[in-house]
Amino acid sequence: MDPRLIPMTLPESTNASPQHWDLVIVGAGPAGSAAALGALTEAPDLRVLLLDRSDFPRDKVCGDGIATHALAELAEIGVHGIDDGWPPVRRLELALGGTSVSSDRHRLGWVIPRSVFDARLVDRATAAGAVLRRHRVVDVALSDSAVSIDDIAFADVVIGADGPYSILRVAAGLPPTGRRALALRGYVPTPAQWEGAQVIRFGERRQPSYAWAFDRGDGICNVGYGEVLGMERQPPTRSLLLAELEDLLPGATTGGDAWKAHQLPLSGWRWDQPDGNILLAGDASGLVNPMTGEGIYYAVATGLRAGRAAASAIRAGDPRSAGRTYRHSVRRLLANHLRHTSIAARLARVPWVVRAGIRAASRDDRVFNDLVELGLGRGLITPRLAGGLLPRLTSP
Ligand SMILES: Cc1cc2nc3c(=O)[nH]c(=O)nc-3n(C[C@H](O)[C@H](O)[C@H](O)COP(=O)(O)OP(=O)(O)OC[C@H]3O[C@@H](n4cnc5c(N)ncnc54)[C@H](O)[C@@H]3O)c2cc1C
């Protein structure tokens, strides 16, 4: 654990009469902390309550891969140093069967345990003025002018950053998120062949699926395997997930611990956010890249925008305009990208296509970086990427 992180046992909410806040944020993961930071950057005097059911630091089942795009979003509002002490990882290897590419991407990545990354973000949010409380939200009620959270708080605007099983999503009137994946993660001592790299090996038997080995740079490697649910087959068991991981990355389960599985709500063609004063960010809004499982960049990017939209609507005396403002800002940022990843994820169900993409990337570094941008940032299927893919699709 990061020695500078002091475990925080949060004050629990009490039964006193509900308090009024300008903004309540449910969930203090990357989306929730970013929302608090976005709001307090826009309006430093705002009264912001950040609720989470857990004390921090807390573990979160994840590959711990942090795309540079997430840190760049934070840097734009003056938040630096979240990666302090964790070396960047430049090398990325993609493989399917005997076809592989291993190259240095032009934008760095990091592998930082979520117990560190999330706690650092929470620290920044509270330093900016957010009040953090431990509370598991069970009931959300809407009235004309405010949203009330259980019997502890009511607010002009509420941001739901409460992950893939979001209660706020239901309160906002949105259907459950669409397609999901299930992934299992563990930690192993880093074997020599994965040092300084992030390795992704796509499955052939249970498509779409992949196994990963992400070296943290401190002698420990985050390893895991995930697959899309549905696909006309039984949901995978824990032993199947472990067996697939070992099959794709031999040795990946040796000496491993902290095995845990969790669902990922994959993004689709369209992203929605209703009008009104309940905003959804990160996993709660169904934003995980369907090709790679990347969700932290989306969580930070949407959290920041939700916070800003909430703050400006409250300041303008029209909290219910927050939903519309936020919807427009996220669509401006991500709408095209989400359509392109939706197409790419459909194509990637066919092993041929994945193989063709890897071959094209191995021939041209620019295609490699286009693929990385599509999978880890907000890139598009560029003409270069499509052009690299087509000839190989027609002659497998
Ligand atoms: C196995 C796995 C591997 C992954 N690997 C990567 C990766 O390498 N890189 C990447 O970018 N993404 C990865 N992801 C996706 C990433 O973990 C999520 O997209 C990201 O955590 C979303 O952040 P968030 O803030 O929206 O939600 P979360 O991080 O889930 O935070 C939600 C918070 O809400 C709190 N909460 C939930 N319900 C309540 C409630 N009722 N009341 C109060 N608090 C509540 C929770 O305690 C939690 O702290 C992976 C996911 C999985 C499952």
Image (cartoon, helix red, strand yellow):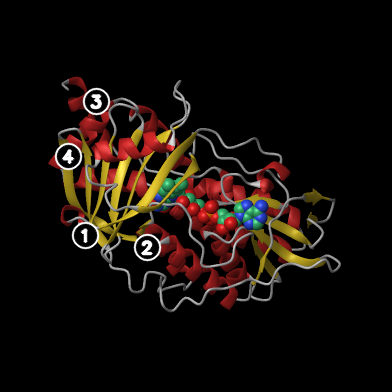
Tell me the kind of residue under disc 3: Trp
Ligand 1 under 8 Å from disc 3 Cβ: no
Helix, strand, or loop for circle 1? loop
Residue 308's place in the image compared with 285, above or below, is below
Tell me the kind of residue under disc 4: Ser
Residue receiving disc 2: 112
Question: Residue at image x 71%, y 55%?
Answer: 137
Helix, strand, or loop for circle 4? strand
Of the two numbered discs 2 and 3 on the same chain, state the one appearing first in sequence.
2
Residue receiving disc 1: 196
Q: CA distance from mark 1 to mark 4?
A: 17 Å
Residue 196: give x, y in percent of width and height.
Answer: 21, 59
Residue 377: give x, y in percent of width and height.
Answer: 38, 50
Q: In front here: 238 or 181?
A: 238
Residue 55's place in the image compared with 96, above or below, is below
Q: CA distance from mark 2 to mark 1?
A: 13 Å
Residue receiving disc 4: 100
Ligand 1 under 8 Å from disc 1 Cβ: no
Query: Are discs 1 and 4 less than 8 Å apart at CB?
Result: no
Residue 132's place in the image compared with 327, above or below, is below
Is 82 situated left or right of 279 in this image? left
Of the two numbered discs 4 and 3 on the same chain, state the one appearing first in sequence.
4
Disc 3 crowd rating (10 Å Cα; few below 14, some 14-19, many 20+) is some
Of the two numbered discs 1 and 4 on the same chain, state the one appearing first in sequence.
4
Disc 2 crowd rating (10 Å Cα; few below 14, some 14-19, many 20+) is many
Helix, strand, or loop for circle 3? helix
Question: Residue at image x 83%, y 55%?
Answer: 145
Quarter of the image with the C terminus in it: top left
Disc 4 crowd rating (10 Å Cα; few below 14, some 14-19, many 20+) is some
